[in-house]
Amino acid sequence: MSMNFSEFKRRLGEDPLSRDEEMLRARNSAPEFEQAALDAEAFERALQNAVNIRAPEGLVNTILDIAHTAPKRRNWVPLAMAATVLLAVGAAGIAWKQSHRWDSVDAYVEDHYSKDGDKLVANSADGVSEKDINRIMARLDAFAGPQLSDRIRFIKLCPTPDGRGAHMVVSTSQGPVTIIYMPNTKVSEGEMLVFDQMHALLVNLDHGSVAIIGTRAQNVENLQAMVRNSLKTGLIDA
């Protein structure tokens, strides 16, 4: 059963950047769905840009001084409320940035995978359309060649230590494996990370890097040549 417009907008409100397969199918079903998604994404980007603006030094103290010294007129209430909102937004921006900092790539990979890596592997679908893969990779100014794209069972945008990247689940003869693409991050080539029951191989590309993550029983090294040959920068024709 197809998703109705009200449900689509409700789920957009929960996650404006969702790349869930059901959401992508609904988005492509009619122009009003696509426009609603574009509007939600534009608002989300504007909000993220707003909270990432660094406040001028001393701004908070200035606002508090104004609050203490301004005459108690009726029109001061909206100004005080605006100052409170500004402080709250600034605090939210600081908290968001602090929650997305990692001491090292090793820490990032372990932390990122621990959030939902196992769940995404368990729930990976039968496949993702080439159009959906291209749309997400194009946001990173990159594309995945057929050796990789034919294997992708799930893909979404995700945070990386240096901006956005892509979180993929791909099929292999050893079972599903996770690949995290970090377009702006360089790693210690060939380093193998071990955490919980998983291990992750770090591989540098011409631009950026990947972490290939699997269970300790899976030979993730077998995938590095395919990944090097398939993940490239530059937009493809729509």
Image (tube, grey):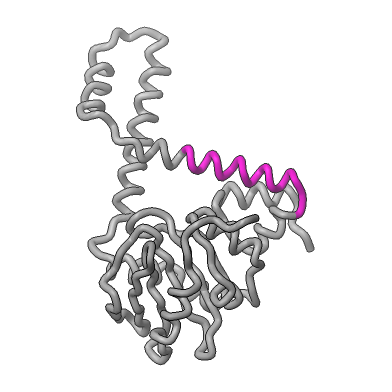
Q: Residue at x 54, y 67 (%)?
A: 144
Residue 25 in the image: x percent, y percent? 70, 60
User: Would you say 70 lies left or right of 113 here?
Assistant: left
For the N terminus, the image quarter is bottom right
Overall secondary structure of the magenta stretch? helix
Residue situated in front as seen by the camera: 82 or 164: 164
Residue situated in front as seen by the camera: 72 or 173: 173
Residue 137 in the image: x percent, y percent? 53, 60
What is the residue that sits farthest to the right in this orientation? 1
For the C terminus, the image quarter is bottom right
Residue 154 in the image: x percent, y percent? 57, 70
Quadrant in the rendering for residue 235? bottom right
User: Would you say 20 lies left or right of 217 here?
Assistant: right
The residues colored magenta run: 29-46
Whether residue 142 is visible here, answered yes or no, is yes
Q: Residue at x 29, y 51 (%)?
A: 98
| Residue 98 shown in magenta | no
Quadrant in the rendering for residue 70? top left
